[in-house]
Structure formats: structure tokens, C-alpha cells
Image (tube, rainbow, N blue to C red):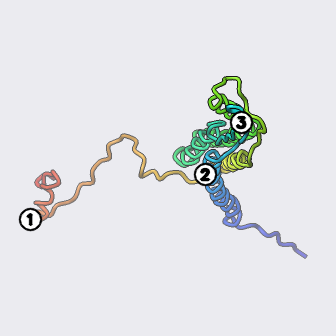
């Protein structure tokens, strides 16, 4: 009895990596765009609140994420720019940009988590309200928005890791939109001397219809 070994079709073998590339591209685009939007939104929300003593009375103070730290918002913008730039470069340049995207996400996570316990922004507001540079806030508490910003950073990090892993198989900007500075020769149109309208069109194009 002879056993016939099935040989996989080359097209079916190539379909797996191609499908993985398309899926990773879609996930990276969604994760990167959503992560940047979430991080930017979170930095505009209230991160911390506390109470300061002003003229012998308690005074409530709040601080937004942008008051606590500007790093997450800045890195979210950098990450979004890197996500777009991934498709404008190739080979080693794409790896560098993908690494920048991943680092932007990691930095956003770190800055957001450090902001959870940061009271400097509220202490500064307390000093301004009380007119005393040594004034600080009491009953300090934080909202969940720093953690939301960290989630946005995690999505940026995921997009960067996907770009590092699968970016080589992703498409790039079309070459017809790129300029290499070279002058392309103009295709010469053959003019029929028996047709006057073609002679006039050649003259309008700046060509000599009488030359061979």
C-alpha cells in the first residue's frame, strides 16, 4: 500500500502570514489611535483633590492631569505621530519609528502611575490660595483618571510592539507620491502633418511639429 503525502499549496502557506499582517495592522491602528485619544482625554480630567486651610477655614482644591504632569499628553501626541510615520518609512526607519511608538506608550504608563501619588500640583495651589509658601493640602485623594491614562499608554505600547513584530509586512505609502528629484523624460506624441488640429496642439505643448 502506497501512502500519498499531501503537499500544501504555496498559496495556502502564504495566506497565513498575510492574514496575520492584515490583522496586526488593523489592531495596531485601532489601539494606537484609541490609546492616544484616551491618554489625551484623561489628562484633561480631575486627577487629585484635597483641602487647604485659607484664613482659618477649609478650602477645597482640585488638580487636572495636565496640572499634575504634562508628560502623558506630550507622549500621546508623539505616539500618534509615530503611528502615522510608520507607513511613511521602510526597513530600518520603520523599526526605529515603531520603537519610538512603543517607548511613547511605556512612558505614558510610567508618568500616569507616578501621578497617582503626586501632590505637588495641589501643594502649589494651596500655597497660592493661602499666601504661604509652606502651605500644603490635607485629605489628599485621587480619582481613577490617572489609571485611565495608563490604559491609553498600554494601548500605545501594544501598537508599538505590533509594529515591531509585524511592521515589515505592512504596506507603505505609494511610490507615486514620492519624489526622487530626477527629471522624467516626456513621452513624445507623434503628430500627423495632415491634421492641422494636431499641429496646433503640438505647438501649444511647446513642441516642434516639424522635427522628426
Can you identify the residue that label 2 sits on? Answer: 37
User: Residue 101: percent from the left, percent from the top?
Assistant: 63, 43
Tell me if I can see residue 80 in this picture. Answer: yes
The numbered dot on residue 196 is 1
At x 73%, y 30%, the residue is: 136
**Splitting the image into 4 quarters, where does residue 95 fall?**
top right
Query: How far is mark 2 from mark 1, CA to CA?
Result: 62 Å
Crowd band around label 2 with a 10 angstrom C-alpha radius: few (<14), some (14–19), many (20+): some
Query: How far is mark 2 from mark 3, CA to CA?
Result: 39 Å
Under circle 2, the secondary element is helix
At x 63%, y 26%, the residue is: 131
Can you identify the residue that label 3 sits on? Answer: 57
Q: Nearer the viewer, mark 1 or mark 3?
A: 3
Q: Nearer the viewer, mark 2 or mark 1?
A: 2
Under circle 1, the secondary element is helix
Q: Nearer the viewer, mark 2 or mark 3?
A: 3
Crowd band around label 3 with a 10 angstrom C-alpha radius: few (<14), some (14–19), many (20+): few
At x 83%, y 72%, the residue is: 4
**Splitting the image into 4 quarters, where does residue 62 fall?**
top right
Dot placed on the residue nearer the N-terminal end, 2 or 3: 2
Amino acid at each position: 500500500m502506497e501512502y500519498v503525502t499531501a503537499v500544501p499549496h504555496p498559496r495556502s502557506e502564504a495566506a497565513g502570514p498575510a492574514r496575520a499582517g492584515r490583522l496586526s495592522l488593523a489592531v495596531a491602528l485601532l489601539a494606537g489611535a484609541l490609546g492616544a485619544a484616551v491618554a489625551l482625554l484623561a489628562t484633561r480630567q480631575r486627577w487629585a483633590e484635597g483641602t487647604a486651610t485659607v484664613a482659618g477655614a477649609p478650602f477645597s482644591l482640585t488638580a487636572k492631569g495636565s496640572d499634575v504632569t504634562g508628560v502623558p499628553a506630550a507622549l500621546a501626541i508623539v505616539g500618534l505621530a509615530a503611528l502615522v510615520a510608520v507607513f511613511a518609512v521602510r526597513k530600518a526607519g520603520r523599526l526605529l519609528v515603531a520603537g519610538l511608538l512603543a517607548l511613547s506608550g511605556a512612558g505614558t504608563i510610567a508618568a500616569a502611575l507616578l501621578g497617582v501619588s503626586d501632590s505637588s500640583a495641589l501643594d502649589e495651589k494651596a500655597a497660592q490660595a493661602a499666601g504661604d509658601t509652606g502651605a500644603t493640602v490635607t485629605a489628599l485623594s485621587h480619582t481613577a483618571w490617572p489609571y485611565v491614562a495608563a490604559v491609553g499608554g498600554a494601548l500605545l505600547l501594544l501598537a508599538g510592539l505590533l509594529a515591531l513584530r509585524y511592521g515589515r509586512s505592512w504596506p507603505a505609502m505609494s511610490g507615486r507620491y514620492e519624489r526622487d528629484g530626477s527629471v522624467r523624460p516626456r513621452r513624445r506624441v507623434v503628430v500627423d502633418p495632415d491634421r492641422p488640429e494636431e499641429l496646433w496642439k503640438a505647438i501649444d505643448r511647446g513642441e516642434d511639429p516639424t522635427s522628426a
